[in-house]
Image (spheres, grey):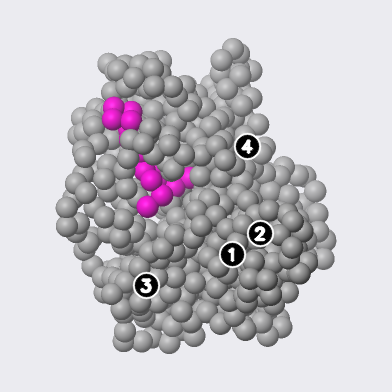
Amino acid sequence: MQTTITRAGTGASLCTLLALAACGSNHAPEELNQMPGYLGTITRADYDGKTNDLLTAGLGKTGLAGATPAYANVEQPTPLELRRNAIYANYRAVLDIAANSGYGTLYGPNVDASGNVGTGEGLVAGSEYIAYADDGTGKKNVTLMVQVPASFDPDHACIVTGTSSGSRGIYGAIGSSGEWGLKKGCAVAYADKGSGTGLYVFEDDSVNLQNGLRAGRVAAGKNALFAPDLSDAERLAWAGSNPNRIAFKHAHSQQNPEKDWGKVTLQAVEMAYYVLNERYGVLARDGSARVVRLTPKNTITIASSISNGAGSALLAAEQDSKGLISGVAASEPQIQPAASSAYTVRQGGAVVANPGRALFDYATYAALYQPCIASVAGNAGRCTALVAKGLLNGADLAAQQADAKQRLRAYGWLVDSDPLQAAHAGTNILVAVTYAYAYGKFSVADKVCGFTFAQTDGGGNPITFTSAQKAASFAAQNGILGNVVYENSVGGAKVYTAGVSPSNSLADQSLDGFLCLRSLATGRDTVSGANLQGTLAAQSVRVRAGMAEVAASGKLNGKPAIIVHGRSDTLIPVNHASRAYVGLNAAVEGNSQLRYIEVTNANHFDSFSSALPTLIVPLHVYLNRALDAMYAHLHAKQALPPSQVVRTVTRADASTLITNVNVPVIAATPAPGNVIGVTGTVVDIPN
């Protein structure tokens, strides 16, 4: 069943929106539940936990591990079908759903909040509230969602944040902090961070709506998830000269959404308080509104999530001026500490050079060298071109790839990442291009460094999205849409892997474009080292200004926090994210309650634990344990675990069942050789 809550909220009068004194209320303003002014209409849907539910959309443990659910009509999927498939896709995207990797035994819908393995499907009954947070223009339209499980107990209230990872939509954290919170009986406050799917197609002027359906931009009006800021004449001109290109929200909203990731996470918490008090607060004596029952004084709120969502949790804790957040449990955070020389990071006593580089800095560096590492004999144009430009050494492919790995290690990656560098080439390409647009607040029509986005065919040519693909885009896409297209390729636009650079006419995977992106990060020509001039210089200023907007302060204001991160993380290297954040926090906060858990053999993508079982274990297990530890600290005053390295054991092969022997617990008293020490402003990580 789905209902709509009016602007004033269920059971509330317009008094909650006007000056309360004018309404004749007998209650002080702070006692009455008021809907935040940035929220639009809230829709509520109730799920019985039998035919449909909050966690699995009715699929259960078995369905989530099965084939992609089919639509009754692929051209016109319903909102319920799109929700189901979005939950299916997002859950599987962040978790390894192979049974031998721990699904169904160490984690999964059937594993309860205490870690007990059940025989059921793990469906969670409850209510789901969704609304846009906006400034009135309809251009921000950040999607917020609150899930309230039927097991929620207002006398023992808890809230967990579930800001989406990557560029994902509103269900992006359903399988990470969302699942933990729902099992614990907590309300879960989600935000899509102003990214989300937001597929815009120029040819038919179509957009996504909040419920996943497609509509024309004019008909959608302010209800569009995203539409580019172009006039109709500009749209038609672009579509005519650049057929089949697309735009999407994270890259092309021209708002640098990352600068607001902490803010929107806090807004999601405020929305949670609003809907919870509408449900559980009693009516005021004059019947005008609900009296606030749940506040930060009687509610445990843990800011959590993974990757970009984990970074959002830390930023929210830094920016929390209202005391909304009780503690933080963050996994593999994409966090960018403000530049500082006030701290030192050491591993095994050796000083780490230049920790805390910004995401766009190290992603554009990786985008140069990882494609070379991924090259094979007979198709090594990227390596050859880098050598020709003086950016790589080596007489043959093996030597060139070894040099590329060494350069990445010198730039902050650990040797633990060496086996994973090739597998991340495509990922860092997407990051580099998407964030260039986002940080610089560029329009889709700017063609930054010659890059656009489109679906492509086997020959690398841009092709149209079919009507069925557009109809399913809300559920099927991860928030970065289409493939990266290099417009400046010799012979015309091609997918970047097939791009031929004009500077050398080599099939070098569009190296000229990535050298350009690298120059935007540094302000200098990547080959010559000369300062940029003209348009590129102006674009670099814009990009670097956007990078500065997202820098973290490191000041958690005394809040308890646990960060877990995989030592083998090749997308978000520990030296530039978590280790550096611990150092900055020590420098700005001194006596901190931040704990850091570094997990060996864990990386950014849990799916690798099935693909590379001899190298990788799932990090998700440690997010759950960090949440358990934080809840125990906040609820029962149990001591936080000390900062430490957890040493895991990989498997012989994918047919071997992973157990707690492979993923040992976070120790209450770690062995001396595993202790991570913070002395003054020096962070010491054991080898």
Query: Which residue corresponds to mark 1?
Result: 12
Looking at the image, residue 571 sits to the left or right of residue 135; the answer is left
Dot 4 and dot 1 residues touching (CB under 8 Å): no
Query: Which residue corresponds to mark 4?
Result: 547
Report the amino acid beneath label 1: Ala
Report the amino acid beneath label 2: Cys
Q: Quadrant of residue 537?
A: top right
Dot 3 and dot 4 residues touching (CB under 8 Å): no
Q: Residue at x 51, y 57 (%)?
A: 6
Q: Earlier in the sequence, mark 3 or mark 1?
A: 1
Looking at the image, residue 161 sits to the left or right of residue 172; the answer is right
Residue 627 screen position, x and y as percent: 57, 73
* Above or below, 194 relative to 149: above
Report the amino acid beneath label 4: Met
Q: CA distance from mark 3 to mark 2?
A: 31 Å
Query: Which residue corresponds to mark 2?
Result: 15
Q: Earlier in the sequence, mark 3 or mark 2?
A: 2
Disc 3 or disc 1, which is closer to the eye? 1
Disc 4 or disc 1, which is closer to the eye? 1
Dot 3 and dot 2 residues touching (CB under 8 Å): no
Looking at the image, residue 454 sits to the left or right of residue 550; the answer is left
Q: Residue at x 45, y 24 (%)?
A: 230
In the picture, the disc for residue 47 is 3
Q: Residue at x 57, y 22 (%)?
A: 539
Q: Mark 1 falls on what kind of element?
A: loop
Q: Which image quarter holds the C terminus?
A: bottom right
Q: Earlier in the sequence, mark 3 or mark 4?
A: 3
